[in-house]
């Protein structure tokens, strides 16, 4: 779709997020909350079917509404694409965590990390672990919240970009392995996995290229360490490129995964380095998307 609209959306992103009443992702979240309240199934199969029907209904509605935007001029398409991205919000959140750590306010850094970036419990994290979790989230969300919607727009216009953002929001709200969501949220989780296969790998490759090739071996060795089929790609690329050991533990303190085990522990100053890498990665990803030759039908020339 329109290269100019894509660039405009990234430019407008510096203005921040629109009001909640006008934000399409907020609308998606409200739909998902209401849909969940309608679930009544008590069996695993019934919960799976309910969740899948709810997800599909929301995806069809989102795509249908967004289709109307494809006929608009490129400036309006760019304005509509902008709230489907979260570049500024992501970078600002990482900077807030860094400032709190730099000022020695570990409780505030933990609070900001939990509020903006991660769903894990943060109250027992050390300063190094907070910095590491922040960098992991920055890498993963660079793919999920910026590169992926841009790629979706480039391939399928506003409908695919909006459906992608809906799928990502549904996974964030339903994609948990808890008793009430293990089955009901399975369709949302699998759809998000599928839609992020290409963006996660593109983000990782751009990060490695932005780092001048550093981190290739870590990415090749550790990209499958996390359970997610996608998150390990950008996270391991960042770990290798920055020379950091990034890991995650469960509630009992047992390691869930380790990325770049030979790296050093993260420091709050590494968040700034990760932000530089994220910006470079995004520049390369944007260039790749702009140069990507999408063949479109040309109208026959009248003779």
Image (cartoon, helix red, strand yellow):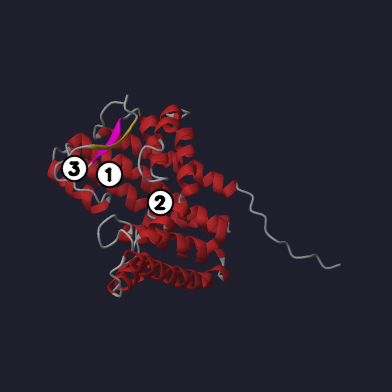
Report which residue position mark 3 lands on. 100
Q: Nearer the viewer, mark 2 or mark 3?
A: 2
Q: Is residue 104 above or below residue 293?
A: above
Instruction: Tell whether label 3 touches label 2 (CB within 8 Å).
Output: no
Q: Position of residue 5 (x, y in %)?
A: 53, 59
Q: How many marks?
A: 3
Q: Position of residue 33 (x, y in %)?
A: 29, 69
Secondary structure of residue under mark 3: helix
Report which residue position mark 1 lands on. 95
- Quadrant location of the N terminus in the rendered image: bottom right
Q: Is residue 143 above or below residue 53?
A: above
Secondary structure of residue under mark 2: helix
Query: From mark 1 to mark 3, how far is it between C-alphas?
Result: 9 Å
- Quadrant location of the C terminus in the rendered image: bottom right
Q: Is residue 94 above or below residue 245?
A: below
Where residue 34 sits, quadrant-wise, is bottom left
Query: From mark 1 to mark 2, how far is it between C-alphas?
Result: 19 Å
């Amino acid at each position: 779709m329109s290269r100019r609209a894509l660039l405009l959306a990234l430019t407008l992103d510096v203005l921040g997020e629109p009001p909640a009443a006008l934000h399409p992702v907020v609308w998606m979240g409200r739909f998902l909350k209401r849909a969940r309240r309608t679930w009544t199934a008590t069996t695993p199969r019934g919960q799976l079917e309910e969740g899948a029907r709810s997800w599909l209904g929301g995806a069809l509605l989102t795509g249908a509404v967004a289709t109307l935007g494809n006929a608009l001029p490129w400036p309006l398409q760019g304005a509509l694409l902008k709230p489907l991205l979260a570049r500024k919000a992501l970078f600002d959140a990482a900077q807030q965590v860094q400032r709190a750590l730099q000022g020695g306010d570990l409780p505030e850094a933990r609070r900001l990390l939990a509020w903006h970036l991660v769903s894990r419990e943060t109250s027992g994290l050390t300063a190094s672990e907070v910095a590491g979790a922040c960098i992991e989230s920055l890498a993963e969300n660079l793919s999920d919240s910026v590169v992926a919607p841009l790629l979706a727009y480039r391939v399928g216009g506003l409908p695919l970009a909006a459906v992608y953002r809906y799928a990502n929001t549904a996974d964030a709200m339903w994609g948990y392995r808890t008793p009430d969501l293990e089955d009901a949220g399975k369709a949302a989780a699998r759809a998000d996995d599928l839609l992020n296969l290409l963006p996660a790998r593109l983000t990782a490759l751009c990060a490695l290229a932005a780092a001048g090739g550093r981190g290739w071996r870590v990415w090749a060795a550790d990209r499958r360490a996390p359970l997610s089929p996608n998150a390990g790609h950008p996270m391991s690329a960042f770990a290798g490129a920055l020379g950091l050991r990034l890991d995650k533990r469960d509630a009992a303190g047992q390691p869930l995964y380790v990325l770049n085990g030979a790296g050093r522990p993260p420091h709050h100053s590494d968040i700034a380095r990760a932000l530089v890498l994220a910006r470079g990665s995004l520049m390369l990803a944007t260039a790749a998307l702009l140069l990507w030759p999408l063949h479109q039908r040309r109208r026959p020339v009248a003779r």
